[in-house]
Amino acid sequence: MPHSHSGGADRYRRDVTLLVGTHPSFLDHSAGEGHPERPARLAAVARGLESSGLGGEIRHFTPRPATRAELVAVHDPAYLDALEEAAGRGGGRIDADTAFGAGSWGAALHAAGAGLDAVQRLADGEGTAAFLALRPPGHHARPATGMGFCLLNNVAVTAAALASAGQRVCIVDWDAHHGNGTQEIFYDDARILYVSLHQCPFYPGTGGRTEVGAGPGAWATLNIPLPPGSAGDAYRMALADLVLPRIAAFGPDWLLVSAGFDAHRDDPLCDLGLSAGDFGDLARAIGAAAPPGRCVAFLEGGYDLVALERSVAACAAGLVGATVVPEDPTSMGLGLDAVAAACRRWEGHVLAGPAPGGAGRSAGGAGRSTDGATRGGAPGGHYPRRA
Ligand SMILES: [Zn+2]
């Protein structure tokens, strides 16, 4: 059992409800035999939610699928058709890391709809925050192709729908990999602030400090690349000095989290140094930065099942302001220079408010400037080094 600071203090906490969205079809997605992005991950997530101490404060829901119109706000129709058709024929492969089976299209549709459903429920007052236990993950998926275990960009589908409804959206992506797909989709869009903390250099090769957005979306993309070994102290410094002030100045109506847990020190694919306790700190800080009842976390990566379970426990509690510490927070002294460099890059821009006129180009617009996804990444990409 995780050691919990909430325990008896729970009764003093204001009433909270964490909406948890998951769908049976998520187990039907197969990325291939022996693939690290496997159905067993969702059982680990479920164990983590159980040990979060939230108990009756969790309300489960079964999300609806995304509609075609919601998907084409982000994805090329020809890609959607090809994916559906290939899944109908039994499956296929997009790249060396990304394969799918007959059940993957249904899973992908519900994964892409989960955030839309959660947003509606939160807007209706059903919960304090939402956590989506979904697969396949989404943040590498580009407009016209999947990649890096991702088929459809779940977080982007929700962000695009919110933005087209006039809402300002911040996406915080703490997965160990840079969310190249999400960045690309919104790179010139002033309505969406994309913030990523990720290992660098690493797959997929994007996410440098100099990538800050373009056109109307300039300074609405905040990348904080971190060297291997970076741990909780670097993340806490990044949040305090850069991420939280930037979010406050941007003034989002909604805060979406690409919540991957592969920055955990035990993850077999990545080399960052976070503990489950660090994820709790991250979730509590980001949850508190969102307007009340306006935070949705989307599961992305995380491939060590014990690390995933513990990290989800701490994250779920943190999203609603509670503290569960399955593992102590870490401090390694690595990555502080990288955070300082990102702060220098952003000097004079952190506190910039909403862009005049607000609306950037809609998702799917021209002028995407990230070509980094073709630059290649670390050898072995998203796969275990021991593959
Ligand atoms: Zn990842």
Image (cartoon, rainbow, N blue to C red):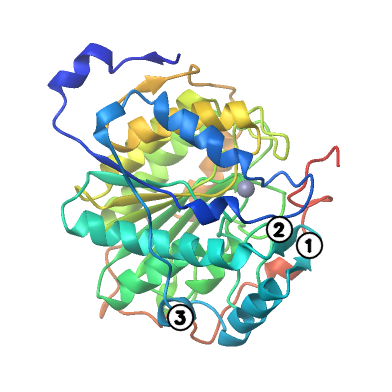
Q: In x, y percent, where is residue 106?
A: 54, 66
Q: In x, y percent, where is residue 217?
A: 42, 73
Element carrying mark 2: loop
Q: Residue at the spot x=69%, y=58% of the render?
A: 148
- Residue named by callout 3: 68
- Residue named by callout 2: 205
Q: In x, y percent, where is residue 141?
A: 60, 66
Q: Is residue 290 left or right of residue 300?
A: left
Disc 2 marks which amino acid?
A: Gly
Q: Residue at the spot x=20%, y=36% of the render?
A: 16
CB of mark 1 within 8 Å of CB of mark 2?
A: yes
Quick one: quadrant of the C terminus? top right
- Residue named by callout 1: 376
Disc 3 marks which amino acid?
A: Arg
Element carrying mark 1: loop
Q: Quadrant of residue 266?
A: top right
Q: Is residue 151 visible?
A: no
The mark nearer the N terminus, 1 or 2, is: 2
In this rendered view, identify the residue nearer to me: 25 or 81: 25
Disc 1 marks which amino acid?
A: Gly
Looking at the image, residue 304 lies above or below residue 382: above
Question: Neighbour class for label 1 at 10 Å: few (<14), some, many (≥20)?
Answer: few
Mark 1 against mark 3, which lies toward the viewer? 3
Q: Residue at the spot x=50%, y=36% of the render?
A: 45
Element carrying mark 3: helix
